[in-house]
């Protein structure tokens, strides 16, 4: 083997070794930001299952970060959604204000904090995703690193020269899939599956202009363990998402 060939081989080996240490999704997400699709849904909503199934399709699509936020305002109908939260409902209300909508509804999908539509209208949502993939908006490069045995995750945000303005950094813990038998309410008797179910999320930092590195816990509140983690960089109060990445935790 020539000296050049040996150097190339060593470089490739180093790349493979580094990739083995990083969570799945970290390198790809840093190179090209995924389009973020947020579904606002509820186990108590009769019209939501088709949208839940579509989110499962999107969760497998390269270049898309699909997240399922379960709201709590349908819980009074006879079944309390175990994944629902007031925080998810508030996030949807923030989008309603930002997108100048008078009401919230389910199933709603919000694409990159910029576009929205009925979650079961697959053609409309696919169109929104294509538009965002082609958009020339300013972006913030985000990466998540941390070996399997690390106690924390390191999140790196690459500065964009301040073009995006003030942003919030959100930490999102979510599970790959949950299946629930529903004995009461509008979906009584059905066994339904949900994908990329958000279990916890919170604002962890502010971002503007300069490069930023943040160490974050691998576990949620009280040491709760989840399947995956995402980081979203977003304009305030339900604005456009300008950066995102996700990684496996298990």
Image (spheres, rainbow, N blue to C red):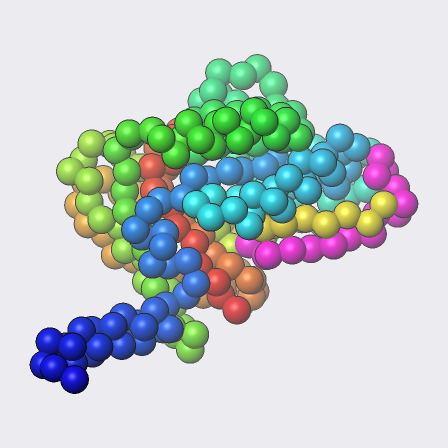
Residue most extreme to the bottom: 1
Residue 71 vs 199, above or below: the answer is above
- Answer whether residue 67 is visible to the viewer in this image: no
The boundaries of the magenta stretch are: 174-189
Q: Is residue 235 left or right of residue 83?
A: left
Q: Is residue 187 magenta?
A: yes
Relative to residue 36, is residue 209 drawn left or right? left
Displayed quadrant of residue 232: top left
Q: Nearer the viewer, residue 140 or 61?
A: 61
Identity of the residue drawn at 72% across and 36% down: 50
Please report the residue visible at 52 percent of the width from the left and 34 percent of the height from the top: 91
Left or right: 237 in relation to 86? left
Relative image position of residue 105 (x, y in whole percent): 65, 25
- The part of the image, by quadrant, that contains residue 144 is bottom left
Q: Position of residue 227 (x, y in %)?
A: 55, 62
Quadrant of the snapshot with the N terminus: bottom left
Q: Residue at x 49, y 65 (%)?
A: 249
Residue 201 place in picture, x, y as percent = 50, 49
Task: Name the one closer to the observer, 214 or 122.
Answer: 122
How many dots with numbers?
0
Nearer to us in this view, 28 or 112: 28
Residue at 32% over, 73% down: 16
Residue 160, above or below 115: below
Could you tell me if residue 137 is visible in this image?
yes
Question: Which residue occupies the extreme left position in the image?
Answer: 3
Residue 225 rendering spot, x and y as whole percentages:
56, 66
């Amino acid at each position: 083997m020539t000296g050049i060939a040996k150097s190339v081989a060593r470089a490739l080996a180093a790349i493979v070794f580094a990739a083995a240490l990083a969570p799945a999704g970290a390198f790809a997400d840093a190179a090209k930001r995924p389009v973020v699709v947020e579904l606002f849904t509820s186990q108590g909503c009769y019209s939501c299952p088709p949208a839940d199934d579509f989110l499962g399709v999107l969760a497998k699509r390269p270049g898309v970060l699909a997240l399922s936020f379960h709201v709590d305002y349908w819980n009074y109908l006879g079944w309390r959604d175990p994944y629902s939260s007031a925080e998810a409902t508030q996030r949807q209300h923030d989008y309603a204000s930002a997108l100048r909508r008078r009401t919230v509804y389910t199933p709603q999908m919000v694409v990159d904090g910029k576009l929205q539509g009925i979650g079961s209208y697959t053609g409309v949502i696919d169109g929104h995703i294509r538009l965002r993939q082609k958009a020339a908006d300013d972006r913030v490069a985000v990466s998540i690193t941390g070996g399997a045995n690390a106690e924390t995750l390191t999140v790196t945000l690459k500065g964009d020269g301040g073009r995006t303005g003030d942003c919030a950094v959100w930490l999102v813990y979510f599970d790959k899939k949950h299946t629930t038998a529903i004995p009461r309410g509008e979906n009584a008797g059905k066994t339904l599956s949900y994908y990329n179910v958000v279990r916890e999320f919170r604002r962890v930092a502010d971002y503007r202009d300069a490069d930023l590195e943040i160490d974050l816990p691998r576990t949620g509140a009280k040491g709760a363990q989840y399947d995956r983690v995402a980081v979203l960089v977003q304009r305030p109060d339900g604005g456009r998402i300008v950066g995102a990445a996700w990684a496996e935790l298990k």
